[in-house]
Amino acid sequence: ASLITCSGIAAVFGVAGIALKVSSGVDPVIDMSGGVIFDEANANLIRVPPLSVPLSQKIVEKRVKEGDGETKTKSELQSELFAVSAKANTETLELVCFDVLMTMKSASSVPMRMKYASIKQLEGKESAELDAARPAKRVKTSSESKCQHILTEVEHATQWIDAVLGL
């Protein structure tokens, strides 16, 4: 079980991290707003916070009624994040994407994950085109070829993330 978890962590923080950077141009960060994502549709998610990049941010003003009956306006930062985690078992290792809504009440407060939704895998023609562009895997032995293999996986993940985000 620990080898499976390590493989999932390597996929998220290695391949997906580099692919997110290439796709978005922004350094991905760990989504600390809610810790681990528990998603019933993806039962085998690794138990680490997902890696994410911000898609949009805005300041939202809310009117709050105080205990003395006075109404105050409070501002909070609301961010939409594109988050990536992985699900792993003895047979497969897949990257899983989420659309996350996060808020912060102040600059020093802990971010809170308000809601999240799993982003469906690409289906049909787009997915087939991405898979056709991916070279067939073969056994590689030298360290140079191992590096090339990782770069090939990053390239595939980047193309996949670009297609998911519609870039």
Image (cartoon, helix red, strand yellow):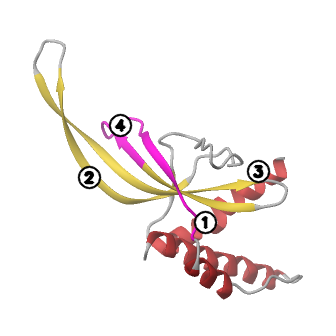
SS label for mark 4: loop
Q: Amino acid at mark 3?
A: Thr
Helix, strand or loop at mark 3: helix
Q: Residue furthest left?
A: 70
The dot on residue 16 is 1
Distance, label 2 to label 3, CA atoms, is: 35 Å
- Residue 147 position, x and y percent, is 74, 79
Dot label at residue 121: none
Q: Is residue 47 above or below residue 145?
A: above
Q: Identify the element where label 2 is drawn.
A: strand
Please state if 167 lies on the left or on the right of 90 as rendered.
left
Residue drawn at x 40%, y 48% as measured from the top left: 101
Q: CA distance from mark 4 to mark 1?
A: 29 Å
Count of labels shown?
4
The residue pinned by badge 2 equals 58
Contact between marks 3 and 1 (CB within 8 A): the answer is no
Labels 4 & 1 near each other (Cβ < 8 A): no
- In percent of the image, x 44 and y 43: which residue is there? 115
- Asked if labels 2 and 4 touch by Cβ distance under 8 angstroms, the answer is no
Q: Which mark is residue 5?
A: 3
Seen in the image, is 98 located left or right of residue 2?
left
Residue named by callout 4: 108
- Kind of residue indicated by mark 2: Lys
**Residue located at (72% from left, 48% from top):** 44
Q: Magenta part of the protein: which range?
A: 101-122
